[in-house]
Amino acid sequence: MTEYRPLTDDEEATFHEFVTYAFRPQAGPEGMEYDPEEVDERGRLGEKRGVFDDGEPLAVCQHYWFETTLRGATVEMPGLSAVASPPEHRRSGNVRRMLEASVEEYRDREAPICALWPFDYGFYRQYGWETANKWTELSCPPDALSFASEAAAETAERAERGGDEYHWRRLDADDWAAVDSVYRAHTEGVDLALHRDEDWWRHRRFTGWDDDPFVYGWGSDEELRAYVFYEFDEGDEGRELRVQEYGARDHEAFLRCLAFCRDHDSQVETMTFRDEPEPLLFDRTGSPEEVDATLRTGPMVRVVDVVDALETVTYPADGSVVLSVDDPLAEWNDGRFRLDVTDGSVTVHRTDADPDVELDVGALSQLLVGYAPAERLTRTTDLLADGETLRTLTRLFPPTDVAIYDGF
């Protein structure tokens, strides 16, 4: 008989073996030798779970208990990670059983949504997860950021005349609170951005798996206004500066980040960084032809409990709609639900009424988090509704700025 449960300390080696073979198969089925003394705090974050049959491990995963913002509400958003099963136990439904049990555990914690970074989008789409956000990877030579250096020089002159003393300085993990303050300002209004705690900053941002990133901050002695996490890679076309993350309180501070990167022009041929799906760089640089942009899909998100999720968020308008939801994994989400919003009061309950809209839980997830308006989802998912219902859904669930910046 199979059971889903936390892993014991004695089963940590099994987790390490399964995950190593899943994501680094060249290490072989037994993986690399596990030494608990070498596991640092980065590797201890999260909680490990597994599916067992009479004590034999069949599949494992890891859960992170994140908090985030979703349409005006602070909610728990568990992060699912390190899903792995050895080849002898694959194609037997073990991962599906573990996903079912994981989502049920999230429901017991009253988490309305959960998220993951997929190894394959199609694999998790069949179980109800859907893309949460997109982002653009930009690569360019340093000189393409000359405009930022020019703007930084102008603002520096004004700052000096005004008596402000802003400068760049090295940062380390003990500066996490100051960096977090900038991060919160940078992500204000962005749904699903994680609310990072001290452990996450210290062990997942300031600490790398192999090498720690370089971290610099810009501001006064009293207030940090921007930061940059970065590393160097030796690429096929020369050395590259890769920005892992930047944060800025305002546009001026953002330009300072770009200028800081540009000042490495004597050391690198290329710099790469992450930006919004529609970046401003093409409209600011004098050399747009030198900028390579690649649109990439981000993590995936899933509604855990339809009733809880719909009752948790705030709505910008009144409206009523009956949704017929199909969920391939969580039977409690299958069926018809009536959503009524009146003067800020929200009620959601099961109903036998004819549905106004038919959709699967993945489409509902994207609608809920603000990934896309309802009309677009009629072209990218199986959402079915008439014109009036689509207008109601758009009033209730307008698109939002949404991004999960962290890997896990």
Image: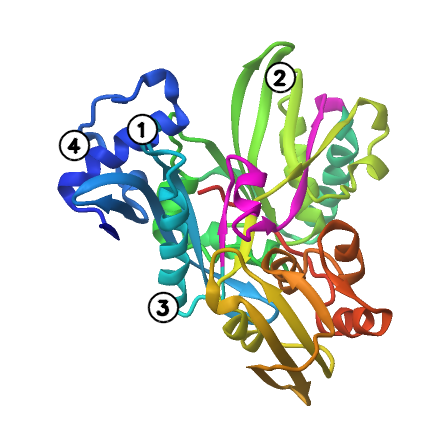
Alpha-carbon span between mark 4 and mark 3: 34 Å
Residue 30 x %, y %: 25, 22
* Helix, strand or loop at mark 4: helix
Scheme of image coloration: rainbow
The amino acid pointed to by label 4 is: Glu
At label 3, counting other C-alpha atoms closer than 10 Å, the crowd grade (few under 14, some 14-19, many 20 or more) is few
Q: Which is more N-terminal, label 4 or label 1?
A: 4
In the depicted structure, whether residue 21 falls above or below residue 267? below
Which label sits on residue 37? 4
* Helix, strand or loop at mark 1: helix
The amino acid pointed to by label 2 is: Val
Name the residue beneath numbered marker 1. 88
Q: Nearer the viewer, mark 4 or mark 2?
A: 4
Query: Is 137 a magenta residue?
Result: yes
Please state if 89 lies on the left or on the right of 54 as rendered. Answer: right
Residue 346 x %, y %: 60, 84
Q: Which is more N-terminal, label 2 or label 3?
A: 3
In-front residue for pair 161/402: 402
Q: Residue at x 70, y 41 (%)?
A: 255
Which label sits on residue 268? 2
